[in-house]
Image (cartoon, grey):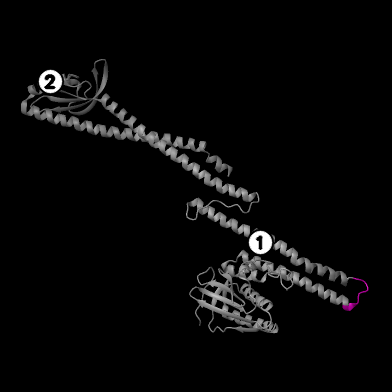
Amino acid sequence: MGAVRGALRPRAVLVVMVAVALVALAAGLLVIDRIGETLIDQRQQAVAEAARDYFVAFAHEEGLAPLAKALDLRERTRPAGGGFRYAVYDAEGRFLGGARLADAEDLPAQGRARIRLLTPGKHSPWQVLVQPLSVGGTLVVYENIHERAAFRRALIVSGAIALVGALGALLACGLWFNRQLLRRIEAVAGTAERIADGDLAARAPAAPQGDVFDRLGLSLNAMLDRIEALMTGMRTVTDSLAHDLRSPLTRLRADIARAAEPGLSEVSRSRALVAAQGEAERALATLSALMDIARAEAGLSSEMMAPVDLAGLIADLGELFGPVIEDAGQTFTVAPWSAPLVVQGHELLLRQAVGNLLHNAALHAGPGAAVSLALEEDEDGVRIIVQDRGRGVPAEHRGRVQERFVRLDSARTTPGAGLGLAIAAACARLHGGVLDLQDAEPGLRAVIGLRRHGRFTARTEAG
């Protein structure tokens, strides 16, 4: 960031912009000079040729002597510094009238040429146009190049003033733009530095429908929200894991210590070891659930997905969980689905997610409650529904219970680690869907919604 800040400093930008402006100014003046010279040359040539044509016609009608008198009169009355002067010579090259700037032998035979003529005090460059006359003799049109050069200089000065003004405005706009650009970059960099210093609540300024920096800010903020959620989840996992594992590990140590006591009967020793094994299995189940959540949240590539028949999956789970739910004193029904309903998914995770919902229903619905498992399909997608008629979950807690280690039983008197719904939610997200907890009036309706056009969902026709 330091290199970028240094490269975008106003002084560095000003130096670069001034250098570019000087190059642009020089190029612009060169273009103006070339174009101006071409335009002036064309204009002056047109004027000279028009004057030539006029005096040629005059000579043809009036003769050489009247033309000489007219040119003498024009020479005497011409304004000082006039750009064009005229002369006429007879057929033998003798000067007849007008401006005597050169002898006939010093002039080209015919056409245009640039020559240097001796004028009072100096040699000056002149453009001459020599035209033979039909009545005999020659007409000469002189143009003073110095006056053309003065006009070019005035044109260049005017162009330079205009270019300097325009480039100055561009420099000001460039510096303003650089300042705005640097301010936006500094805001994003400041947010990153605050995050690096531990302020996970810092966010980059961003407008919902702004420029590319606002889009960058929105993307950065979304990433920071995800990081903050993961960090918060990590802290929650650490705290809850310490709380949930402390008891089984304490009991495990006590059971092992008891089994190691000298003089303990074999029956008591065996019971202590069985109890220790049970505590170890509960601790391992908690860690395994955490690994399942981590695997689901990390995401899987499309190569790890395979066609899964949801109709067959719920039928298998119905057979597996039916006896368990009925042993808990509850009734269980599985809505029949005759045709295969296939999606691209991870069958093991889907089975575990739906199994966790069924296990939660059996655990928390209470004796006598009705539990059901069903599939629904419409143009929006596919839904796996587990519903019970138990106590349900208050609306204000339905989002929180999908987090890891969150249990409404804060005293933790019921079995479990508070990971079942978290696994189901992570599995739904992995498949481009969502876990939605609804009020069954009474009870809880847990819906894993898989969008028809989601990331991994697809359907085949029944065959």
Disc 2 and disc 1 in contact, CB within 8 angstroms = no
Judge whether 107 appears above or below 253 on screen. above
The answer to if 264 sits in the magenta stretch is: yes
Can you give x and y, in whole percent of width and height, for residue 90 in the image? 11, 22
**Which amino acid, by three-letter code, is at mark 1?**
Gly
**For this rendering, which residue is in front, 100 or 160?**
160
> Which residue carries the number 1 mark?
233
- At x 54%, y 77%, the residue is 342
Q: Which SS type dominates the magenta stretch? A: loop
- Res 124 seen here: yes
Q: Is residue 242 left or right of residue 377?
A: right
- Res 93 seen here: no
- At x 61%, y 48%, the residue is 193
**For this rendering, which residue is in front, 80 or 275?**
275
> Which residue carries the number 2 mark?
73
- At x 89%, y 70%, the residue is 260
The answer to if 228 sits in the magenta stretch is: no
> Element at badge 1?
helix
Q: Is residue 267 left or right of residue 302?
A: right
Which mark is nearer the camera, 2 or 1?
Answer: 1
Chain part drawn in magenta: 261-267
Quarter of the image where one finds residue 63: top left
Can you give x and y, in whole percent of width and height, for residue 158 in the image? 33, 31
Judge whether 414 appears above or below 175 on screen. below
